[in-house]
Each structure stands twice: as structure tokens, then as C-alpha cells.
Amino acid sequence: MCSTVCMCVYIYNSAGLAYQLWCPHFDETEGGRKDTQCDTQSHLPSSSVDICLSDLQSHNRKYAFTKMPKPLTDQDKRKQISVRGLAGVENVSDLKTNFNRHLHFTLVKDRNVATKRDYYFALANTVRDHLVGRWIRTQQHYYEKDPKRVYYLSLEFYMGRTLQNTMVNLALENACDEATYQLGLDMEELQDIEEDAGLGNGGLGRLAACFLDSMASLGLAAYGYGIRYEFGIFNQKIVNGWQVEEADDWLRYGNPWEKARPEYMRPVHFYGRVEHTPEGVKWVDTQVVLALPYDTPVPGYRNNVVNTMRLWSAKAPCDFNLKDFNVGGYIQAVLDRNLAENISRVLYPNDNFFEGKELRLKQEYFVVAATLQDIVRRFKSSKFGSTEVVRVDLSTLPDKVAIQLNDTHPAMAIPELMRILLDTEHQKWEKAWDICTRTCAYTNHTVLPEALERWPTDLLQNLLPRHLEIIYEINRRHLERIAKLYPGDHDRLRRMSLVEEGDQKKVNMAHLCIVGSHAVNGVARIHSDILKATLFKDFYEVDPHKFQNKTNGITPRRWLVMCNPGLAEVIAERIGEDYIRDLDQLKKLLAFVDDDSLIHDIAKVKQENKLKFSAYLEEHYKVKINPNSMFDVQVKRIHEYKRQLLNCLHIITLYNRIKKEPNKNWTPRTIMIGGKAAPGYHTAKLIIRLITAIGEVVNHDTVVGDRLKVIFLENYKVTLAEKIIPASDLSEQISTAGTEASGTGNMKFMLNGALTIGTMDGANVEMAEEAGEENLFIFGMRVDDVDAMDKSGYDAMDYYNRIPELKQAMDQIAGGFFSPDQHDLFKDIVNMLLHHDRFKVFADYEAYIKCQEKVSALYKNPKEWTKMVIHNIAGCGKFSSDRTISQYAREIWGMEPSLERIPAPDDPRQ
């Protein structure tokens, strides 16, 4: 019986965690406990001695759990200074109080009726409270110090989930863990309720997200500007082996991380006509759409800096289509508001492919026009606390503002800034152009011709007539300059023009960006070299000083500390925690490369991650896999240049070899391929169908057993990447040399202890430099070899006829071995590979197969494999986005990064 003190029972789960089971008579509304007389035993679902945790969780309406510390080992004591932050008693108590407060006052629920989603929102709001003071203090700090600000303009920000990342960056993870356990909740379960913010297609959008994290962590006054798409990248379902797209209604339940800012709503104009008057140029009779900003906080890593990502949502003005309605037209006029608001409805799902639709151009101008109004407003504003307009002269704009264009999607920023300077601020052309070029900089992300944006002039004339005039004038002056430098070279003028003549006149947006920027960069050294030697060769010859390289990077906060805490701890035990903000310190691991304890710990963490992911696969994909097999992973957008087909040919070859010699000692492999295909990209969707078809045959072959399994990972996204990457053994980076601008997935795998099999393409080249080429599995043609083959001609049939295993694999695909119900299902793939393969899959087949044999051989020697892993992790320092952003800041934006902490909200003002 319990009277003044509640009786409690201690239970240990299989992991050795002790739990306190309190008397069930506690106030669920407030999360407190009542000392009511009761017979605790009568409420237990089974004997209090051997009660199991799952029983407790199934009765979580009755019991409050408190995770109790078990006696600390020496290793545990070392981990008290944890990369996850400390769980102080006061901290935990405050978090619980605030959690219950939000459940009660924000969500208007008590514990009797609250759902798991309510608990997630209560936790998210509790964590967000810790951001708000820092967010306001950061913005005050910027107003007072008036630093140069950088504006990162991107049509994509692939953020993923926010809750855990925020806890990591604010050092709240352990305290929140503890608080949720004490409240009888499962932290992982709550985290899984959060929707991914999937406002991007792949690498370009995820890079923007990593950059925001690094800019905040380096104390830069930075803002991300983009579109708040109502529907992000589609959810991918695999139905009968085919990709089916479903809308991603990520905002359905609300977004606790954003704050609408209607007071900063801005008008954006479309259509209309241009009038040249004595008072200046006027753009009149336009259609107006309002841009409503939503702000999301971006916390730096434990430095009290919280920057802002501002995403614009399209709203129709109140008088939209109502100016001349008659009685019968009122309803239709209100319904037509949707036409204006469609601008921010959905993300275009194309990666490395340009689709010249009017709605897409509207999106590109919408984000640019709203953002530039905001930039000018903020530039003109004075220090914090004053609403007076103090800067009326925009000539100092480049001293206080840097605009980075993430690919050509925000290229309209250049003519829009010129329009503001000329038509609103009444600057002379020469002065306006000087301000514009010194403010803007351009990042190129691809050399694939089908990805380069070329907008038809008739579309621009209709939608943005003033901007087309400005583009024509920019082009006239640009070509005048080129003609003076190269008199009589008409072919050069044609090649370098911003306007391409032909059946349909088009504006080359990359050319506009180069001419209108003071800096142009590629995203890996090999990519930047290719730009200078081929795509932008003429421009490089004229303005070599403009061209730079900024090799991409990834944030180690999300891609190590958050997604692989076990590995982060193992590293911290050897070299301390400073590497999280200075990834170059990973080089210190080279001193431990022969240390048996580190080899053991890294292998152990990898195996734990594999077991966890195996359980996840079994639960979500109903596939049972061998966790002792090599996890061979290729996850990225499905595209011919990324050569998932080369991977398929290896799978078929390996399958045929196992069938031929079933008694041989094969290295078991689980080959996982994941990624989305653009909905209109027929070949990419057929590649997915081929992968699933191969899996259907291989996975049901009893001769092969668990020595080879093929899994297509449905709906690959940021959150799935955070699960699969820490569990991977082998990372497939096998694009044709010269086609992948950089890649960032390659860096994530490397940092998380996977070895890379890859071509000398993108950032793979620099990864091999940093870790030592002998510590990667490099194969295949180099860029020079591909160029030589382009000149001499690529004959796929020659390889097909000469290599028996390749011929066998292709005949199986063509003959219906993998599609018995429709023998010619893959005829388009077969025809492409044999007759018009731009990416030369067969040319690298032999080298790839031989290289995979080396991989299999090394995997049989776990110690040597893990040593190679340590070399790779130690070589990752260069690939932190902190390094990338530091280079952008110093070499393009004219800003200096800082690792200083700014005062916390509860610190006295300085």
C-alpha cells in the first residue's frame, strides 16, 4: 500500500537500462504524481519481478517511467562529457514542465486524450522555445553590429527533419531524451512523426541546407531565401515494381518550426507592358501576386547564433480579378485566386533536367522579386530599434550585401536588381551595373546540356517585358565589349551571346549569370576545370579572374553527430570533441590506424548500425537480410549518367557466377539501390523497374540464398539517408567521368565509415587525394579517356561481342529472364545501351567487375577493411561544409567567419 510516498518497482530491460515504475495514480494532465492510497501490485500487467518493457509501453496510459542510471563504467564516465550534451537535473525538470505547458496551452490537450502527434508537437514547441531567445538575440546582434550580410538564393532547400538537428546544435539531446523517458514517451517514436521538409530534389537542395547550417555555425550574418512549396518532392511508392508518385502533403498537420511574417508581405508583378516616359521607365498594367514570408530558425552549433531561412508563399491580393466583376463573376473571381497561389503550390520534380514551363519561370521570378525587395528594405534600415530610413544611397550595397545564386534558377535576380536600381532608385546604367556585378555571384552545378536553362524570349516578353528589355541591353553592351577584344570573330560573338538565335530565340541563363556576377564557381576541382576548358571556355578567356572552385561539403552535425552518434562518440574518445567544428582534426585518427581497440570499436559501431537497419528493413520492407553480408549501397537520383545500369550488370554477373559455382566461398552481399526518377523521365522509371525485376528473381532463388540479395529502397529521402548511410559498407559512386559535378552523398558515406567504389569523377578525385587512392576502389575511364572515346567513337557492340559475361547479362535482360510475363519489357534499355548510350556503360564494365572482385576479397579480411575505413574517416576533413563556406566567405563574399559564441539570451547585454 502507498500512503504518503508512492511505491515504485525497478525494472531492467535487455539493454541494462533501469526503469522506475511509479504508482499509477498520478495527475496525467500536468504529468505530476498524486500520493493516493492504492495497491500498486494490482495495477501491474504481470509479475513486478519479470515485467518487460514492452508490457509497460503498452500500458503507458497507466504508468510513468523514469529511466534510472545504472552504475557507471569507466567508459560511461568518459561519455559524461558527451557530444549529445549533458542532462542536468534542472534542465530535465524545465523541459518536462515546458512540455506539459505546451501540451496544455498550445495543443489544448491532456494526457488522457493526447495522441503521439500531440506529444511530438509539444516536444517540438518545447525545443523551439530554446531557439527563440537566441534567434531574437542574433538578429539584434546583427542590427547593432551591422555586418555584411549574405543572401543564399535557391529554389530548393532539402532540409529533412528539424527536431533532432536542433537538439544536437543546442546540446539538448540527452536532456530531452531523459525528459521524454521520465514522461513515459519514446523519443525515437516522436521523432518519426515529424515530416521531412522535402523542398528539394537531391544534391543541390541538400547542399543549400548544409550551407545554412555551416553559415550559422561560422557566425555569418546569412539568410536562405526560397519558396515554401505546399507540396515538396513527391513520395515514391513502388507498385508491382514500378514507381508511382504521390503528393507530399508535408504541411497537412502544420509546421511547428515556421513563423509567418505577414507584416513583411511583398507585391510581385507579372505581365503588363513597359512605358518609356520623360520621368523614366514604367512597368504598368501588371498582375500582382503577394509574397508572404515564413521564417524558419537555423541554429549554429552551440554558438548561440540562430539565422533565418525565409521561404515565400504566394497569396492572391484581396482584389484579385475583382476589379471589374459583374454579379455573376464574383464566385469565379474568388475561385480564380488559386491561379495566383499556384506559384508556390509544388516543387518541380526534375533533377538535372530543364523544363521550360511558364509556371516554373513564375516561381523563379517570384522568389527573386520578393527577396530583392526584402534585401533593399533591410539594407536601408538602420540599426536595431530605429525605423528611420538611413541609407538612401545604394552605391554601398556591395559592401553590405552578397547575393549567391545557387545555379541559374534565381538568375532573374540580375535583371531584377538592375530594374530596381534603374527604374526605382534612378541610378545611371554604368553605376547600376557596377553595383549589380559586385553584389552577385553564381554557382554552377552541372555540365549536362539538358540541364542548362534557356528561356524562350516570347515567354519572357509576355511574363516579364521590362526584364527582357534589360537583358537585351546587358547583352548589347556585353557583345560590344567582346567585339572590341576580338574584332571580326563573329563565331565567338554568337557563342558568347546571352541570346541564342535559331528556330526559337532563347536567353541562355548561365551566360546571363556569368556576365552579371563578379565570381563564378564550380563545385569540385575537376568540375571547375571542365567548366573553364569546355562549357564556359570563351568566358574564362575573357575574365579568368572570375572563375573559382569551391568543392562541396556536408555538415558533420547532421551527417555524423546526429545520424551516427556511436561513431561520433568513438572518435571523440580518441581525439576529443573539437573535430565537430573543425573536421580537419580527424587527421589525428591516423595515429590510431593500427590501434586494435579503435579497429574493434569502429567495426562494432558499424555492426550495430547494420543490425538496426536490418531490423528497420524487416519492419518496413518485409525483407529479411543477412546483417553479416556486405551492405553495398547506391542511393541517389535515378539518372542515366549516374549509371545505376552498371550496378545492375554487376548484380546479374554476380548472380550468374554464384549459380555457376554454388559451392564457392562467395562474399555475401546485400545490394541496395534507392532514388527517385523524375515523373516524366521514361528511361529512369524503366531502370527502377529493372532493379525491382532483378530483385524478384535473385531474392527467390534458393541456390543463391542469402549470399546475394537485391533491394530497391522505396522513397529515398533525407531521413532514410540518415538511416542507411551509417549502416553501409560500400558506397557506389560510379558516374561516367566528367558528368557528376561533385556529389555529396559520396562524402557522407566516407565520413560514416563506408568504402567507396567509384570513377575519377566529381569530388571522388579529391576524396582519393585526401584518403590516398589506395584506400578507395577507383576504376574505369578518366575524363581524358572519355574525351578520347568521344573523338574516336564508342562502339557498344564491340564490348557486347567481346565480353561473354556482359553478353550473357544483356541477353538475359533482352530475352525476358527478368520479365517472364513480358519478354520485351526492357527493350528500350537494351536498345539504348547497345546503340545510343551517352554514358558508355559497357566501356567501364570490365574494370568495374574486376574492382568489385577486389572489394569482395578485402571484405573477407575485417581488420584490413576497417583500417582502410579509418584512413577514409581521417581524410574527411576537407569535406566539411564549414570549409566550403569559409572559402565562399573569404574569397567571394568578402566576409570573415568566426567561431566565437555570441551571448546567450540569459547572459547580460554587452
Image (cartoon, rainbow, N blue to C red):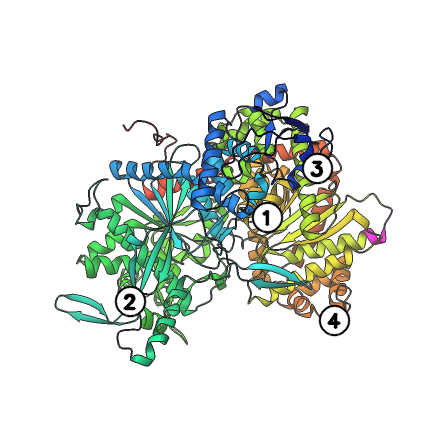
Say which of marks 4 and 2 sits in front. Answer: 4
Q: Eyeballing the image, is 442 above or below 608? A: below
SS category of the residue bearing label 1:
helix
Q: Foreground: 328 or 444?
A: 328
Give the x, y percent position of residue 309. Answer: 39, 47
CB atoms of marks 4 and 1 within 8 Å: no
- Which residue position is annotated with label 3? 45
Residue highlighted by disc 1: 720
Amino acid type of the residue that numbered disc 3 sits on in the rendered structure: Pro
| Number of callouts | 4
Look at mark 2 in the image and give the residue it sits on: 472
Relative to residue 805, is residue 56 depicted above or below?
Answer: above
* Magenta residues (range): 658-663
For residue 774, side relative to residue 454 (left or right) = right
- The first of marks 4 and 2 along the sequence is 2
Image mark for residue 822 = 4
Q: Position of residue 548 (x, y in %)?
A: 40, 46
Q: Is residue 803 magenta?
A: no
Q: Residue furthest right?
A: 663
Q: What residue is rendered at 73% in x and 51% in y?
A: 623
Seen at 33% across and 37% down, the residue is 138
* Labels 4 and 1: the sequence-earlier one: 1
Identify the amino acid type marked 4.
Gln
> Mark 4: few, some, or many residues within 10 Å (few <14, many ≥20)?
few
Mark closer to the observer (3, 1)? 3
